[in-house]
Image: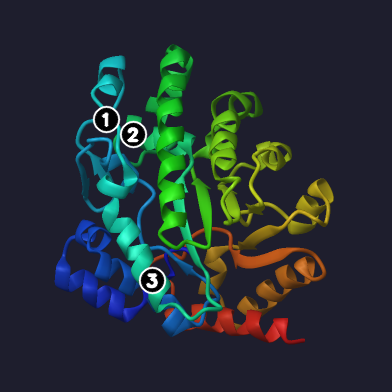
Amino acid sequence: MRQAGRILKPYRELRQRHGSLLKLFQTPELAAEITLMPVDMLGVDAAILFTDLVTPLEALGCELAYAPGPVLSHPVRSAADIDGLRSPVPEDDLAYVLEAARLVRKALPPAVPLIGYAGGPFTLATWLVEGSHAKDFPAFRRMIHSDPALAHRLLDLLTDLASRFLRAQIAAGAHAVQIFDTSIGLLSPAQFNEFALPYVRRVCRSLAALDAPVIYFPLAGAQNLSSFGRVGAQVLSLDWRIDLDAAYGLFGDTMPLQGNLDPCALYGSEASIAKAAQHILKQGRGRPHIFNLGHGVYPDTPSEKVKLLVDVVHQFAQT
């Protein structure tokens, strides 16, 4: 479960002690400690590397701060801005992420995999052009209409960045990687086919020869569901808006699906959490399915509810 660590008391103590979220990301020992917390304290079946979707953008030469969410000091909105970006080498410019991965891999029990991740090229572009979070990310969407050639140039650059970053994470010990496309729901089918599909497919192709499954997570993209099977990922992760039975009906029972409990279900009663989880588990039974939330854990989610969910899933697996 992505972001599960931030609901735990030791994480909050680390955050209070060190103050800067950026310091937690950029200090390998701290990032590794946080990555391991959900495994040790909640009993989850995989560790998800503690980093951020926008982390590789700083390696382009974009100054990054958190206030409280990520803010880039100089959004990229022109050809001159793109010309001014660096050509990062993940092994050097993002070495702290890779060292955290190596530390986690050494500390994990053999049966627990480490999952690395990066943003999809379109999602990275929305952040890079907007400069911070915004409703519907209008700045990059404006670019794809006003200057599509410039948008494609930026997407090409970010595809190479995401590909290199994920390959480096695999080399550092990640057993699998996930591509988070959390802005992809902004695109119509025609826009997805032009401004997202070719680039995320290229990322997947760049990883194909490596011994690490690729998971693709397109948030709020139900309008493009039929296209997600063409991405080239080995696993498709779905948010809570998409019914698993409907997705299996579209892709067939051989396509591994991940998900997809609504994270807000964890605010419910113990009985309602168990019921909601068991419904999804029954849909996935006999099919290739990885139980997960349909997005990250909200920061005020009670940790005991998350532990309850993990226990419900483990108990179901034994029946």
User: Looking at numbered disc 3 in the image, what kind of residue is underneath it?
Assistant: Val
Q: Earlier in the sequence, mark 2 or mark 1?
A: 1
Residue 210: x and y, percent?
56, 51
State the image quarter where residue 41 is shown.
Answer: bottom left
Of badges 3 and 1, the one in the foreground is 3
Task: Report, in whole angstroms, how far the alpha carbon at label 2 lies from the one at label 1.
Answer: 6 Å
Look at mark 2 in the image and give the residue it sits on: 128
The residue shown at (61%, 42%) is 221
Residue 185: x and y, percent?
56, 39
Q: Crowdedness of circle 1 by 10 Å Cα count: few (<14), some, many (20+)?
A: some
Identify the secondary structure beneath mark 2: helix
Between residue 163 and residue 20, name the one nearer to us.
163
Per the rendering, the mark at residue 75 is: 1
Between residue 9 and residue 53, name the one nearer to us.
53
User: Looking at numbered disc 1 in the image, what kind of residue is underneath it?
Assistant: Pro
Identify the secondary structure beneath mark 3: helix
Q: Earlier in the sequence, mark 3 or mark 1?
A: 1
Identify the secondary structure beneath mark 1: loop
The residue shown at (26%, 42%) is 58
Task: Report, in whole angstroms, how far the alpha carbon at label 3 lies from the one at label 1.
Answer: 33 Å
Observer able to see residue 271? no
Look at mark 3 in the image and give the residue it sits on: 104
In the rendered view of the protein, which quadrant contains the C terminus? bottom right
Q: Is residue 42 left or right of residue 240?
A: left
Q: Earlier in the sequence, mark 2 or mark 3?
A: 3
Q: Is residue 228 left or right of residue 296?
A: right
Find out whether the residues at labels 2 and 3 contact each other: C-beta distance under 8 Å.
no
